[in-house]
């Protein structure tokens, strides 16, 4: 097997072009490209090759399905995917999931979760979630102050989940837009609305996975590329390399905002993402990751 050819072909074409290559391969050789890759490759190199060969939406819904039906529930994957989706992306993923697995995405995920995380996931996948709704700044500020007052006493998690989970979608930032005074009016309103959640009080009231999930929502609304940079940093610097997260983010964001994610990674951690991945991976898997980052 010429692994270099595989790496070059898969990384030098867009996802749409890779779907065409798959079909041509089947016509020319009467074989499935995916099955041949499974037969010839192995490990994380095989995993990322197969991920690149899937339509992006199919890959993401498979990640969500595996997150619940794998050997352990991967709540981090579920939260990462859901908080980063815009309204139309969520609608499309729900339709793809329904077609592929014959289940409603929200009901499927909620069935395997419990407690506060279940409530949050239900809110994030709610079919009535409004992305394009106009922001009533005065009302939102009043609600934010009201929530903060309740925080001083006892936070009502259901209300907080409603406010965070059903709010506007994430804001996209390029690193050059990060300086004070350069934010859009929409972003400024969001920052005003969310001030109670950006401090330390929520870290006192909540612990464990729900704390992580609530922070993820706020961080992703604030700055989606920076949020993914943080996810990658944690995947590379945990007790063991989280290859599933690395593959998921690089494959799913490669044609969206991966260059911005790289810039934010460097800004936040004073290290190139390519260097961090080089130090933590090896072999053809490493070569593939680096080629995705630097095609």
Image: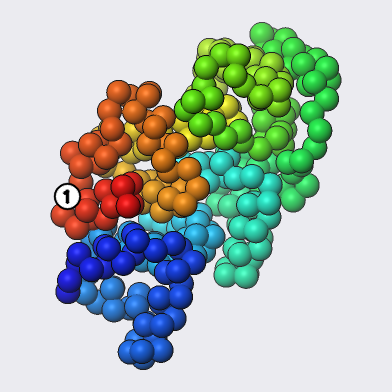
Res 41 quadrant in image? bottom left
Q: Residue at x 67, y 30 (%)?
A: 164
191 relative position to 235: left or right: right
Up-down: is 190 above or below 161? above
Q: Residue at x 43, y 50 (%)?
A: 254
For residue 67, say whether it is visible. no
18 relative position to 7: left or right: right
- Count the marks: 1
Up-down: is 135 above or below 31? above
Closer to us: 103 or 135? 135
Q: Residue at x 41, y 30 (%)?
A: 264
Up-down: is 139 above or below 40? above
Closer to us: 177 or 51? 177
Where is residue 5 drawn, in percent x and y?
A: 23, 68
Where is residue 4 drawn, in percent x and y?
A: 20, 64
Closer to us: 125 or 230? 230
Q: Secondary structure at mark 1?
A: loop
Residue underneath mark 1 = 282
For residue 171, say whether it is visible. yes
């Amino acid at each position: 097997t010429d692994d270099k050819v595989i790496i070059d072909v898969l990384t030098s074409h867009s996802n749409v072009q890779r779907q065409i290559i798959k079909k041509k391969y089947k016509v020319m050789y009467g074989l499935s490209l995916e099955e041949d890759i499974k037969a010839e490759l192995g490990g994380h190199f095989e995993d990322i090759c197969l991920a690149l060969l899937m339509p992006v939406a199919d890959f993401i819904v498979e990640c969500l399905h595996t997150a619940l039906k794998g050997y352990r529930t991967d709540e981090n994957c579920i939260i990462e995917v859901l908080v980063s989706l815009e309204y139309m992306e969520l609608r499309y993923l729900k339709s793809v999931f329904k077609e592929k697995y014959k289940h409603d995405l929200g009901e499927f995920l909620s069935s395997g979760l419990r407690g506060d995380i279940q409530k949050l996931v239900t809110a994030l996948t709610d079919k009535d979630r409004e992305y394009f709704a106009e922001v009533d700044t005065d009302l939102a500020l009043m609600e934010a102050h009201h929530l903060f007052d309740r925080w001083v006493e006892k936070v009502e998690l259901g209300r907080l989940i409603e406010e965070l989970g059903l709010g506007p979608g994430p804001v996209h930032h390029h690193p050059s837009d990060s300086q004070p005074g350069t934010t859009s009016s929409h972003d400024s309103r969001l920052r005003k609305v969310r001030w109670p959640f950006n401090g330390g009080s929520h870290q006192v009231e909540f612990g464990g996975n729900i704390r992580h999930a609530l922070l993820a929502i706020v961080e992703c609304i604030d700055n989606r590329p920076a949020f993914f940079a943080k996810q990658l940093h944690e995947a590379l610097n945990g007790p063991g390399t989280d290859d599933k997260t690395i593959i998921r983010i690089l494959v799913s964001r490669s044609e969206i905002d991966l260059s911005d994610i790289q810039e934010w990674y460097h800004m936040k951690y004073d290290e190139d993402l390519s260097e961090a991945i080089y130090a933590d991976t090896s072999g053809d898997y490493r070569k593939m990751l680096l080629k995705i980052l630097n095609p």
